[in-house]
Amino acid sequence: MPPKKRAPTAKKPAVKKTAVKKTAVKKPAVKKPAVKKPAVKKTAVMKTAVMKTAVMKTAAKPLPARPKSTRAVSVPKPGTIPAAAGPSPYETPYHGAPLGAHVSTSGGVGTAPPRGVDIGATAIQLFTKQANQWKERLVEDAEGQAFRAALAQTPVAFTNAHDSYLINLASPNPDLRARSIDSFEHEMRRSNTLGLHAVVSHPGNFMDDRPSGVARNADAIAEVLERVVGPTRLLMELTAGQGTVIGSTFEEMAALLARLPTALQARVGVCLDTAHVFAAGYDLAGDYDGVMARFEDVLGFSRLGLLHLNDSKAPLGSRKDRHELIGAGAIGDGAFRRIMTDPRLAAVPKVLETPKGDDMISNDRAMLRKLRAFAANR
Ligand SMILES: [Zn+2]
Ligand SMILES: [Zn+2]
């Protein structure tokens, strides 16, 4: 999942404390856009708002340890890059496939391409609507054209949407499944109008029995792809395997894709999230070659449309979806060095979904510089 999904109560990793303090101290000087938060998150947002007020009043003093919140942080306007952000990753030569991160669309999807530039990205992932609300919106042709025109002014060469967290195309509940299909269809329509390369979608929760859930998920995808035709591919994301979620094994993902009508299969691929597959039990840290060989055997690199590069706070096989900064989690730098130099992955776009930090820019810049250095074997 992208970083916005992180529970606001999650603890900040100890290594980030210094950076957090520095950033927070600078905050009062920065014009703060209004914090707009979904109603469902009110409690957490309000708590954080209280904390932020306290932070501003005591700006000159070091901050006490406080709960991490990547979501309740005010989002800087595109082009306002904090001094702490460090050099742009664009300054580190890199000749691989598009590489970037999930970026905020606060202020509209048109703000995403310049935000990608701010972090030094050549790939961006975004939400085309509020991801934790059912409310839908349409993207009119003019908005799509404006987005594409803004994008053309940037080095960003790959764009994808991540669909809503509420969608469960595998649900046995007819009402929830119908609502999910409608929401998924809206997502595919918006993304096509914006000209995005892909929509990333999580397989749903089967709730009753697994094979029926896989079938319901595949049938819902087929239904929507038959109605919505356009340039945007669908990439089904491998999951961590918590609860009754499907798609945490390569075999189950292959079964889901195999159920799609042949005519639709070329429009559907796979997104491999390193934190998810590690939590699902694939040991990228200890057996990189074995995991990738298994992926090739069962799914095939030709179906791999996107990599989500995240370290994992949760241990191998824990089935927990907890993203961490690259090198700071249970996976460690080694696997990411391998990924950045693996010729089989050279043409696959790569997107970070790691914790943003308070200024929304510094962490992503540091991660992208690090990955580019790995690619250059530094
Ligand atoms: Zn995801
Ligand atoms: Zn992901």
Image (cartoon, helix red, strand yellow):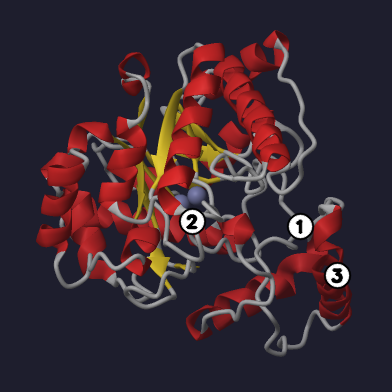
Of 102 and 206, which appears nearest the observer? 206
Q: Residue at x 69, y 60 (%)?
A: 71
Dot 1, how many residues are within 10 Å of its Cα: few (below 14), some (14-19), or many (20+)? many
Task: Say whether residue 345 is left or right of residue 226.
Answer: left
3D distance between C-alphas at marks 1 and 2: 32 Å
Of 323 and 97, which appears nearest the observer? 323
Q: Are marks 1 and 3 in contact (CB under 8 Å)?
A: no
Q: Are marks 2 and 3 in contact (CB under 8 Å)?
A: no
Q: Secondary structure at mark 1?
A: loop
Dot 2, how many residues are within 10 Å of its Cα: few (below 14), some (14-19), or many (20+)? many
Residue 155 is marked as none
Q: Which residue is labeled 1 in the image?
A: 74
Image depth: mark 1 or mark 2 in front:
2
Residue type indicated by callout 3: Thr
Image depth: mark 1 or mark 3 in front:
3
Q: Secondary structure at mark 3?
A: helix
Residue 245 is marked as 2
Quadrant in the rendering for residue 155:
top left
- Earlier along the polypeptide chain: callout 1 or callout 3? 3
Establish whether ligand 1 lies closer than 8 Å to the Cβ of label 3. no
Q: Which residue is labeled 3 in the image?
A: 43
The image shows residue 183 at horizontal and vertical percentages of 67, 32
Dot 3, how many residues are within 10 Å of its Cα: few (below 14), some (14-19), or many (20+)? few
Q: Secondary structure at mark 2?
A: loop
- Does 223 sit above or below residue 319? above
The image shows residue 303 at horizontal and vertical percentages of 26, 33
The image shows residue 59 at horizontal and vertical percentages of 80, 79
Of 160 and 210, which appears nearest the observer? 210
Q: Residue at x 33, y 73 (%)?
A: 317
Task: Say whether residue 144 is left or right of residue 218.
Answer: right
3D distance between C-alphas at marks 2 and 3: 27 Å
